[in-house]
Image (cartoon, rainbow, N blue to C red):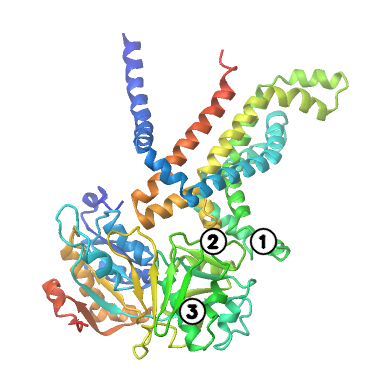
Amino acid sequence: MKRRFFDLAFAILGGALLLFILLPLVSIILQATPKTFWQAFSDPEVTRAIGLTFAAGAIATGLGALGGVPLAYILARRRFRGKRLVEALVNLPIVIPHTAAGVALLLVFGRRGLLGSWLSPLGITFTDNLAGIVIAMLFVSLPFLVNLSREAFALVDSELEAVALADGASPWQAFSHITLPLAFRGVLSGMVMMWARGISEFGAVVILAYHPKIAPVLIYERFEGFGLSSALPAAVVLVLVALVVFSILRLALTRDSRG
Amino acid sequence: MATIPPATEISGKVPLVVFAAGSLIIPFDHLEQAFEARYPNIDVRPEYHGSIQVIRHATELHDSIDVIASADASLIPMLMYGSQVPETGKAYADWYIRFASNRLALAYTDQSKYAAEIDASNWYRVLSQQDVRTGIADPRFDPSGYRALMAFALANNYYRQPTIFFDMFTGRFRRSIGIFQDDDLTTITVPEIVEPVANTGLVMRGASIQLIALLQSGELDYAFEYESVIQQHGLNLFSLPEELNLGSPDVDYSKVLVRLDFQRFHSVEPEFPGERIGYGITIPSNAPHPEEAELFIAFLLSEEGRALMQADHHPLFEQALADNHANLPASLQGLCAPAETP
């Protein structure tokens, strides 16, 4: 009896929260009439912004994986001094307000920034272009990739690696033939989460690159400048496309692993 | 968005929501402090945008706003007189007070490219170079943007070089901004999508104040700003000739017209004729706190308000002028003269 009351109370509390997430999403999806789709997809500014957003998110994720996967592996497998510090550092972008992250990135990658002042004479700049969008997304979304990959690597039995090494495999071979394939699902879901977080970023991107406009910036500008009716088609389509892509990826990732 | 949060009841203060042009942010901040010191029961809640945005927050996004201050007074009759509050059917506003002017100018820093060489004879050539980064506000949202376009069109005639506008803007927008010149009127058409082409040196933001940080961080070499704003930030000021800066009472700027060529505004087709810059202020008819709003405007026009604006390099007119003077709240009628009806 007590147990049932406990379960019921928790279910109600949790359910209320679910409703809180669902209601806004459902009400924006209900706005999706054939007309909104036609408006959105016949509007080159919207299609371009959505394409740019997804592409920039993918590039950021690719770059993130290049450094994030090795970092995650080291955090999962090795003990070293300052490990806690590194872990805290990886999670910093989650706690920093993203507009502040944008300003901080500008101080480094801006034309007079720490690195920017060296790179801009070479023609490499990070404001109002794709590179700026990518570094902003990379900065704010990297923790998702590193954390999920680290958990995935930690779940791989280190004995398997030890056996491979004992049998004469190089550490590279052990990683690429044993550890990475076994942890692949987790690493991939880390990448999906990173991509998803990247495409939803607004604050850091808008500071570095107002143009070319990614979808969140375009939606904001449309809402501010032209009102709700103008922002809605782009918002509806972005929400739907993100939901569909995200569900497919999650489904593909979790299908076999469910016991 | 601007609905009254419960904090009101806790603090016991009347929240006075002021939406103002971005170029007023510094003087209005000082005004707010002095005003709140005088009226401790009022809590001013300011929000700043490009002036078209400011008004659309009232008329399109239906925020509850007590005071609206626009960098282009003509936007108030254009966008507020003709549109009705859905609940009351009354126009959003039926009067405004023109209280100050300004001058369009270029802000730059010592690090700006060609900072040592720029002068009255070559500024437009400097800005049209691809390696010089120039910021202007989006003409769809901020009067400073369409005023910058006007300045270039006026420069065509002033310098007797008909390609100045063309040299500055051609190839720098994904959809070009049109310019059509006949004998006595130059018409500039702004398309629905205004987006600079990357790496051509032209940088655009929704409001001119958003360009200040970019200038300070070195992303921009020059930015079109109002003189008051440049002085408030201690940036280098490059003054445009009186014939182009839209700030002189003695110059006729009416030979240029900017049209926003798209149908997103209710019923109106926005056209901005060249004219001397005039800032306008009004109280929307659906303001939740009209009496406090009157106090705020009266304070702006008082000796104390005048001194504060002056200290921030944004002097008020000697005599504020009211459009539809008879419609003003009684407490404000004595503070301004009726504008001459054209």
Separation of disc 2 and disc 1 at Cα?
A: 26 Å
The answer to which image quadrant residue A76 occupies is top right
| CB under 8 Å between discs 3 and 2 | no
Mark 2 or 1: in front is 2
Using a 10 Å C-alpha cutoff, classify the residue at mark 2 as few (fewer than 14 neighbours), some (14 to 19) or many (20 or more): few
Quadrant for the C terminus of chain B, please.
bottom left
Q: Secondary structure at mark 3?
A: helix
- Residue B307 drawn at (x, y percent): 30, 81
Mark 3 or 2: in front is 2
Residue found at x 54% / y 38% = A196
Residue type of the residue flagged with mark 3: Phe
Residue A175 vertical position relative to residue B276 in the rendered view, above or below: above
What is the chain identity of the residue bearing mark 3? B
What is the chain identity of the residue bearing mark 1? A
Q: Secondary structure at mark 1?
A: helix
Residue found at x 78% / y 21% = A161
Residue found at x 15% / y 77% = B325
Q: Which residue is mark 3?
A: B152
Using a 10 Å C-alpha cutoff, classify the residue at mark 3 as few (fewer than 14 neighbours), some (14 to 19) or many (20 or more): many
Going by the image, does A95 lie left or right of A1?
A: right
Separation of disc 1 and disc 3 at Cα?
A: 32 Å
The answer to which image quadrant residue B168 occupies is bottom right
Q: Is residue A21 visible?
A: yes
Residue A96 vertical position relative to residue B296 in the rendered view, above or below: above
Residue type of the residue flagged with mark 2: Arg
| CB under 8 Å between discs 2 and 1 | no
Q: Which residue is mark 1?
A: A116
